[in-house]
Amino acid sequence: MSVARSSIANRIKRLGYDLYFSLERSSIRRDILLYLNAYPSGVPIFDISQNIDASYTNTKGAILGDGKGYNIETSLVSLGLVTCNKVRGSMVLYTLTPRGKEIASMLLESDTVAFR
C-alpha cells in the first residue's frame, strides 16, 4: 500500500472503527460516497445503482442496511455519511452530509481509493 493510501486509510480509521470497517469491507459504499460527492442536490437509489454499476438491492443495503449482507449499524445513513430527503410522493433523494463530504474528499485525495 502506498504512503498516500495508507495515510488516508489511517485518517479514516481515526474517525472511528465502524466507519473504517464499513468502507474497508464494501467497495459499493466507497463508490456511493464518491458518486454522491458529484451530485450535491441528491440522487435516487435507482440512479446511484445504475451509475456505480451495482444492483439496486446492494446499493440500498449499503445506504440503509438490510440486516443481511449489509449491517444496519454500518450503513452509510447510520454512520452519518448520507441523508435521505423525501421530495415528493415516494421520491427520495440521497445526499452526503458534511461528514460524508469530508470522507469523500479524503478518498479523492489520491489517484486511487485508500482501500483498493
Image: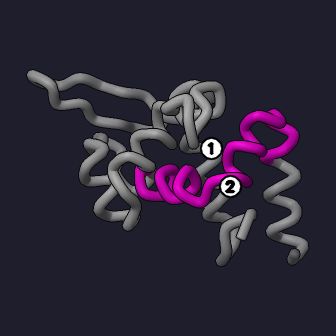
Please tell me whether residue 69 is drawn above or below residue 2 in the rendered image.
Answer: above
Residue 65, horizontal then vertical, whole percent:
51, 32
Task: State the scheme by which the image is colored.
Answer: one colour
Please tell me whether residue 5 is drawn above or below residue 45 in the rendered image.
Answer: below
Please tell me whether residue 104 is drawn above or below residue 18 in the rendered image.
Answer: below
Residue drawn at 74 percent across, 64 percent down: 114
Nearer to the camera, 75 or 100? 75
Disc 2 marks which amino acid? Met
Residue ranking furthest to the front: 68
> What number is the disc on residue 38?
none
Q: Horizontal placement of 41 versus 36: left or right?
A: left
The span picked out in magenta is: 12-36
- Asked if residue 35 can be seen in this view, the reply is yes
Kindly state the secondary structure of the residue where label 1 is placed. helix
Q: Horizontal placement of 66 versus 54: left or right?
A: right
The part of the image, by quadrant, that contains residue 115 is bottom right
Residue 52, horizontal then vertical, whole percent:
40, 64
Residue drawn at 30 percent across, 44 percent down: 45
On the image, numbered disc 2 is attached to which residue?
106
On the image, numbered disc 1 is attached to which residue?
102
Q: CA distance from mark 1 to mark 2?
A: 6 Å
Residue drawn at 67 percent across, 65 percent down: 109
Residue 18, horizontal then vertical, whole percent:
76, 34
Q: Is residue 22 magenta?
A: yes
For label 2, count other residues whose C-alpha is less than 10 Å away and answer few (under 14), some (14-19) or many (20+): some
Kindly state the secondary structure of the residue where label 2 is placed. helix
Residue ranking furthest to the left: 89
Disc 1 marks which amino acid? Glu
Would you say the residues marked 1 and 2 are in contact, meaning their CB atoms lie under 8 Å apart?
Answer: yes
Q: Is residue 25 magenta?
A: yes
- Asked if residue 97 can be seen in this view, the reply is no
